[in-house]
Amino acid sequence: MISQSESTDSTTVPARFTLTRIPRASWRFIRRWPVIPVVILSVLLIFAVFAPLIATNDPNHQNLRRSLARPFWYNEYYETDPLGQKLEKRHILGADKFGRDVFSRVVFGTRVSLAVAIVSMASGTILGAWAGITSGFYGGLFDELMTRFVDVWNALPFLLIALVVSITVGQGVMIMMVLLIMLTWVGLVRNVRAEVLSLKTRDYVLAARVAGASDIRLMYKHILPGVSNLLLVLASLRVGGLILTEAALSFLGVGIPSRIPSWGQMISDGRDTLDEAWWISFFPGLGIFLTVMSMNFLGDWIRDRMDPRLRQLAD
Amino acid sequence: MRNFLARRLMFSALSMIVASMAVFGLAHAKEDPINLFIQPGYFMAPETLAALKAKWGLDKPLVLQYLTWAGNMLRGDLGDSVQQSRPVTTIVGEKWGATAQLAIVAWIFGTITGIPLGILSALKRGSPTDYFARGFALFGQSLPAFWVGLVGIWIFAVYLGWLPVFGRGAGLPFFEQAKHYVLPVLVLGWGPMAGYMRITRSAMLEVLDSEYIKLARAKGVSERSVIWKHALRNAIIQPLTIATLLLAGFMDGAVLVEVIFAWPGVGRVAVEAVNSNDFMLITGTVFIFTALYLFMSLVADLLYTVVDPRIRYA
């Protein structure tokens, strides 16, 4: 790492290894590559995959004797016997009203948040890419209908619609994903379509058509690679927002069903006891914040790497 | 211009129809709404049931119900709330002011902090000011609003006791009432403020990099004039046009904030309506939110053509 940065650095003439150079070189490395977001996201991913190994307490186990137990930096972290001797460790990040371990719930919560966000982002991107490419490629009536449909869709107040859906259809991880896919795909259609409109008039596409390529082949062999950068950038910029939306819905009690630990739900659980047990709401919120911030950072970085022209797409 | 306006209006009307159908259908999709009237464990005579159904028009096919509703809607009648037995328009009318006030104050906050911050961080690119502004924006986009609200309540209301915990503080003196606005406005406005800031910043950077700015500088135009006359006027177009859309977005976001801060607005009415399966009130409130958004996007489109004459009415 050090030698690499020295070779690119032309201002320092002698390439000597001194201790003072390490911080500067690593600072340069951190500024160049998205180290911090990647580290945070990897840790969260490990949490999600190995949740039962990391959080050994059952996240749904209730124990009213431990209701509102405090985190480890309070003395209550240790269960003490009558003589005042420390016996065993309890809840690292405290427990909630029902005595459920906050740390376990936060760790298991990463599963739901990441799974929902990744699955709905991926499916939404595929659907949005299909809609955008098809309507941009064929144009005509289909295109007109699609753009109008997207406009109407965008005008609907998503939060309220989601509330209504959760009441009429029910709650569940699957339903949550479908709702988020519906939110995601419309956001992509317009951008993809605009890009396809310019791509399909390029010479290489025309040449492929002359060579006898079918419409399907043109769309997926020749045009899709042209919009893949755009898709990657948009998806990585918007996945953070999806996590926030999922958490908001769970917070309102209409997202993930309560038997599955999720961050939004936990924040809502801790509302009533905020003044005596702040940790119940605080840590899941911190989890959301770290995840979304890392994803936003990473999205910005990918965008700048891939195509700085897309700067305006951020919002 | 006339043509553009006509097309645009027609499209808005079409959107409204599709949206209202969707909402109406969804709100009626649950088990027979007539069950709302029957308390669990009680028996209702079939005749009474039939009379009730007839009264609410639930005995007719859904299409007919929708047409009746739509016809009344055109006459400004959104039907009666099932639970409160009052017209939906009256209920929404009572609460509308609170939501609009909150949204407008948050909107003003977002605009007057976001745009100047964006300009400042573009002008002082790479400076501590820039990093601070960008960090502030990043936090605004990454923090869950409802969590910020709770932590804000915990710190400023419960722990420090500086701000009130909930409500709107109607009837209190101005200063006391203003205190009620601090946390909700901050929670509602921070995220959009970040959006403003980022858009303004990137637009400003792009403009500052353009040929005509270089020409102006080469001509010896003063730096102040370059920034305020040449750069800002061109960079401000985008943030200004999203401003109207954001105001509509605030109405949507208000749902969450109203629930957290017990703000007596339309958003809370809607959430309560959904929870009690009050199909008329659900349809009415969602319809109003949608209409508002469509209206705002119409205004945004028109504004776009006014602010930037280069855009042709297509």
Image: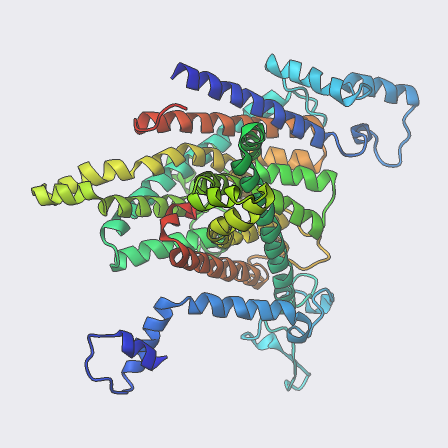
The residue lying at 35 percent from left, 76 percent from top is: A26
Which quadrant would residue B273 be assigned to in this image?
top right
Nearest the eye: A182 or A262: A182
Q: Check the picture and name the quadrant holding the C terminus of chain A.
A: top left
Nearest the eye: A268 or B29: B29
The residue lying at 57 percent from left, 22 percent from top is: B14
Residue B262 visible somewhere in the drawing = no
Apparent side of residue A105 relative to residue A204 in the rendered image (left or right)? right
- In the image, residue B127 sits, relative to residue A29, either above or below, namely above
Nearest the eye: A96 or B188: B188
**Residue B130, position as x, y percentages in the image:** 28, 55
Q: Specify how the rendered protein is coloured.
A: rainbow
**Residue B261, position as x, y percentages in the image:** 53, 43
Apparent side of residue B156 relative to residue B37 in the rendered image (left or right)? left
**Residue B88, position as x, y percentages in the image:** 63, 23
Nearest the eye: A263 or A293: A293
* Furthest-left residue in this view: B220
Q: Check the picture and name the quadrant holding the N terminus of chain A.
A: bottom left
* Furthest-front residue in this view: A211
- In the image, residue A109 sits, relative to residue B13, either above or below, namely below
Number of marks in the rendered image: 0
- In the image, residue A101 sits, relative to residue B72, either above or below, namely below
**Residue B5, position as x, y percentages in the image:** 43, 18
The residue lying at 52 percent from left, 23 percent from top is: B12
- In the image, residue B71 sits, relative to residue B19, either above or below, namely above
Residue A314 visible somewhere in the drawing = yes
Apparent side of residue B54 relative to residue A3 in the rendered image (left or right)? right
